[in-house]
Image (cartoon, rainbow, N blue to C red):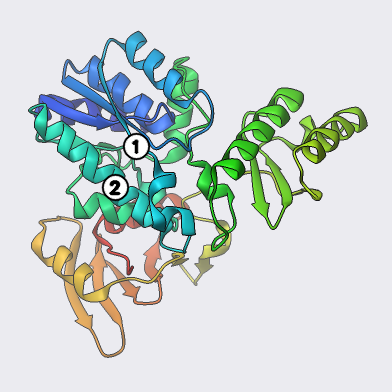
Amino acid sequence: MNTNIKINKVKEIFKDYGKVALAFSGGADSTLLAYLAKEAGADVLAITYDNQIFPTGFLEFAKRRTSELGIRHEIIESNFLDVGDVVENAPQRCLVCRRLMYGAIKQRANEEGYEIIIDGNNVTDLTHDRPGILMKYEYEIESPFIEAELETYEIHKFLDENNIEYSNSTTCLATRVKTNETVTIDKVNRIDHCEAYVKEITGSDVVKLREEKNVATIELSDLDTILDKEKIDSIVEELKLSQYDKILLNLKAIESDDELILDDELEKGANNLTLRKRLPFGINILETDRILKNKENDHISNIETIEDIGYIKLHIDEKESRIFRDGNISIENNKNKEDAKESLVKILPFIRRTV
């Protein structure tokens, strides 16, 4: 299915919804959803949740883009630095944040008369360790991009080809602090300032500064933008003034998580390919089995769960497949990489991960 067909499918979904509330950050996914909803003539309410620890300019950008798109915009303000679980920064911090965010957005949407709430999750997101996806299921949030089988690279490509502006700076700054190290206002402000400085000096589209025990590690989407002695000296001086003891550069560029299937995940047989995909999280076999059996799908059949061993046997488009508790997925008898991907996207929305 090509991208234009998928985009048109999203528009049809909006026509079916009629009236919808959108979790809006101004990033690529939510911006495209807002744009397509407006094109489809839907009654859209964009809701932005400001937790006070987003990058500078986050809220102003969201306000401007919704105004330019002609979409009604509501803002929910909260301070996550008043939430003990967020400040303590335990491994479940992201889950706590998403629960608070989705809960508040759903409540506001319902108060405003909107029963359907959507977010920008796409099929690529289903292959990454993002615990917030669990809140999508808990709060019954719809994801049109998943239904239309859109991938991250297709969303970015469509936005770029149509000159639709979006922000690359919409991730919570608490994600930059090493897990189990306390998140404080001083750390958040320091990270925010230093990221903005590095971005200004380098011009890199995406800049992230990871902090661990007063050590700053700089990550960029374009490493070439920093490979200049004068720029490096200026950045080191500024970060030292910000009280970092050591400044490191990650030599692996920030990637956009575009690839749904990597070449080394395909195993060649005599006449076909077997996909062996390892998801970075455990799979709740019983819940996945329940979802598979309760939802109609013409592509999935012959479902059998072997609980004591920990896997589900099934056919995806008549191909023998298995879903394992440890996160492994195997799909046999694929003609090529694209064929394997088409089968994978048919099963990903049904998989439920363990907490």
From the top left corner, tell me how far across and down residue 287 is, in percent.
20, 70
**Who is closer to the viewer here, 132 or 6?**
132
Q: Which image quadrant for residue 201?
A: top right
350 shown above or below 153 = below
| Kind of residue at disc 2 | Leu
- Given contact means CB atoms under 8 Å apart, are the residues at marks 2 and 1 in contact? yes
Q: Tag 2, which secondary structure?
A: helix
Residue 78's disc is 1
Position of residue 118 in the picture relative to residue 250 (left or right): left
Looking at the image, can residue 4 be seen? no
57 shown above or below 348 = above
| Kind of residue at disc 1 | Ser
Q: Tag 1, which secondary structure?
A: loop
Give me the residue at 30% from left, 23% from top: 34
Give me the residue at 25% from left, 49% from top: 136
Mark with earlier residue (2, 1): 1
* Label 2 neighbour load within 10 Å: few <14, some 14-19, many 20+: some
Residue 100's disc is 2
Residue 173's disc is none
Q: Measure the C-alpha gap from mark 2 to mark 1.
A: 10 Å
